[in-house]
Image: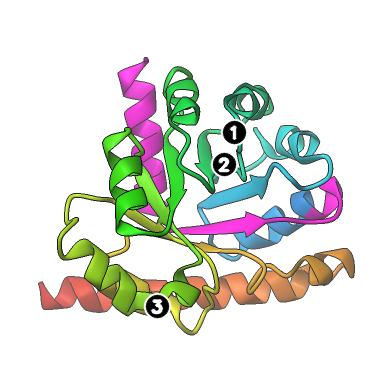
Amino acid sequence: MNGKLFEERVGRLRDATIIAIFRVQAPAHAVEGIGAATRGGFEAVEITMNSPGATDAMSEVAGHTDAILGAGTVLEASQVKEAYDAGAEFIVTPTVNLEVIEAAHGLDLPVCMGASTPTEIRAAHKGGADWVKVFPAEQLGGPDYISNILAPLDDVNILVTGGITGENYLGYLDAGAELVGFASAVFDPALAAAGRYDELERRAVEINRRLDLYLTEASETE
């Protein structure tokens, strides 16, 4: 492992705080949608591997954005190399699959590994996940669930996805989550298919505006 490159990617993802997630109907929708998200302030973006032409979209985005690019819905270790070859710099998987961690870390890629229960979350963390992706966060109990999980598991870095909106996401940061992922509730595939990238950009701007205010207020109270 190239420790310096790996830590650089971990740092970029942690500094980004919020991730724009695209599960779309065509590669062009992801490319244009990511453009809208980054213009709106997002510094981390993700394309799910179960989107049509996902690696084609990654290849087109990679090298043309300052945002760190991730591959989501990675179910098998073999998909890690596909995503890496297409330009992905971090991996997100919905299940506890330690082979995905091994494959990703071998390519200096941080991993966000999906889990729901305390047992799964602990297993993902002990297995080497850099973040544990708790989802569907809103359906599991929202910020209160994250607070309750982190009470005994306070050494786990948490990413939350699932039902996250511009209106509720700051509560997850208050609860202790390090990263927050916005999927179809914000980056609606139907809007992308309709060419409404202006609306996706507007949503991105509003989310980042709220984050900037939140971080400013937090720094002033320290």
First of labels 3, 2 by sequence position: 2
Residue 131 position within the rendered picture, expressed as x and y whole percent measured from the top left: 36, 46
Residue 214 in sight in this render: no
In the drawing, does residue 169 fall left or right of residue 32? Answer: left
On screen, residue 157 above or below 174: above
On screen, residue 5 above or below 137: above
> Which quadrant would residue 191 be assigned to in this image?
bottom right
Label 2 sits on a secondary structure element that is: strand
* Rendered image: mark on residue 141: 3
Q: Residue at x 76, y 36 (%)?
A: 60
> Which quadrant would residue 70 be assigned to in this image?
top right
Q: Residue at x 31, y 69 (%)?
A: 146
Q: Answer yes or no: do the residues labelled 1 and 2 have beta carbons within 8 Å?
A: yes
Label 1 belongs to which residue?
Answer: 88
Q: CA distance from mark 3 to mark 2?
A: 26 Å
Residue 6 position within the rendered picture, expressed as x and y whole percent measured from the top left: 37, 27
Q: Residue at x 52, y 38 (%)?
A: 91
Indicate the amino acid at tag 3. Answer: Gly
Residues drawn in magenta: 1-29
Label 3 sits on a secondary structure element that is: loop
Q: Residue at x 72, y 55 (%)?
A: 23
**As rendered, which of 172 and 86 lies closer to the eye?**
172
Magenta stretch holds residue 9: yes
**What colour-coding does the image apply?**
rainbow
Q: Quadrant of the image for the C terminus?
A: bottom left
Label 1 sits on a secondary structure element that is: loop
Number of residues whose C-alpha sits closer than 10 Å to that of mark 2, classed few (under 14), some (14–19) or many (20 or more): many
Q: CA distance from mark 3 to mark 1?
A: 31 Å
**As rendered, which of 149 and 160 lies closer to the eye?**
149
Label 2 belongs to which residue?
Answer: 70
First of labels 1, 2 by sequence position: 2
Magenta stretch holds residue 85: no
